[in-house]
Image (cartoon, helix red, strand yellow):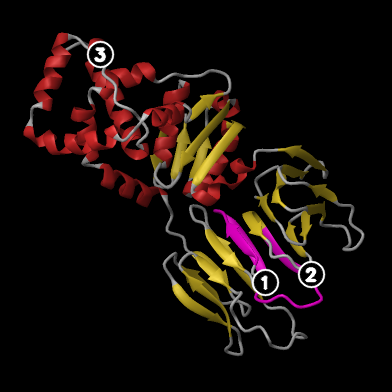
Amino acid sequence: MSRDFGKIMELAQKLARTIFLRERIDKVDSSKDLDDGEREYIMQKLGEPSYWLERSRLKKDIDHAHQKDWERLRAHMVGDKKIRHLRAVIKVAAIFIGVVGLTYLGFKENFITDENEALYQQESITLELENGAIEKLTSSGSRPFMNGQGGIVGYQKDNQIDYSGADHQDNQEQPLQYHRLTVPYGKTFQVVLSDGTRVHLNAGTMLRYPVRFVEGRDREVFMEGEALFDVSKDARQPFVVHANQLGVKVLGTQFVVSSYPEDTSINTILLEGSVGLYRASHNMGSEQYTVLKPGFMGSWNKAMGDISVKVVDTDIYTAWTNGRVVFSHLKFNDIIKKLARCYNVSITNNNARLGEATFTATFDIKVESIRDILESFKRNYGFDYDYSIEDNQVNIY
């Protein structure tokens, strides 16, 4: 064996992890990169019956990975300053998939389950009712919610609460009754409001809303965090989102509002329709609107108190609704903020150079753990850093 064989085996194991979690690689032959002793060792291992079944399963997966999947892997991460090609690593490691990778496959289920158990806090989604009572929700729940008079105002089914089918023919003169939905880090949830407006809440989001809207009054909701709104059109009742210092007023449209306390700006991304942005401190009826068109983002700078508008790729800002996270020319220090929300972990970066570096990348948070993502940055960009994960605390050095 060569002196570098241990390193090659280590690279093979890391690559196998990538393959089995993402399934985005084609089969390559790299026997010319190995010496005779290494090839002899591989052939011996490939002949062991204990690996036959696992290899046959792997071969079926690889045979379905066509050239376009290889291109998708290469495009998975593109550095803003320097592109790091994985071709050499892949050539060396692919031959070991049957040996190292398939050994790892036996631990795949435990790896995903155990790590997520350790990193994800089992904090419940909560719903605060109009009387102050707090209900814990699960993504598989099925139950009605009632008001003080015993009438059903909403119904939960799985990962959604629907208020649109309830009987809201009660006295319109009664004061509005609000529910407050809080979605912790690491989870998402959906709400259908009484007018049929759909709201998709991202991790770390709070939404306060009336269980029914009153005729003749604006449909107002209050939020902190990030949410995608698909507003039912009603020309008689504008829909207003209050996001701390920013107000968003619409009739019927689809847009995203991101208003996390730790962010320096409050962003509104318009997908379709039209919205008007205004300072929340202004009196209703005398606002100076900043009007957005589809494909534009309006950013309220918290420190400066002004709104800027620019064209954006809206897919970047809606990817989270499909379980993906997309970074486009984003500093690593800002990236770890988003990762902390997605995975419900606390991330401390002690590497100043890494923190200021910008990256473009896409990850599937449904199948990729926080460890997988940190390994991807380390492997693809070649930064000299290390990290540790203990419970829900991640430290980067």
The answer to whether 378 appears left or right of 197 in the picture is left
Report the disc number at residue 237: 2
The answer to whether 339 appears left or right of 26 in the picture is right
Q: Residue drawn 12% across and 26% down? A: 46
The crowding category of the residue bearing disc 1, from other C-alpha atoms within 10 Å (few below 14, some 14 to 19, many at least 20), is: some
The three-letter code of the residue at mark 3 reads Asp
Residue underneath mark 3: 4
Q: Residue drawn 75% across and 85% down? A: 172
Q: How far separated are the C-alphas under marks 1 and 3?
A: 65 Å
Nearest to viewer (mark 1 / mark 3): 1
Report the disc number at residue 195: 1
Quarter of image, res 308: top right
Q: Residue drawn 77% across and 62% down? A: 251
Q: Secondary structure at mark 3?
A: loop
Quarter of image, res 149: bottom right
Give whichever of discs 1 and 3 has the lower sequence position: 3
Q: Secondary structure at mark 2?
A: loop
Q: Which residues are magenta?
A: 197-223
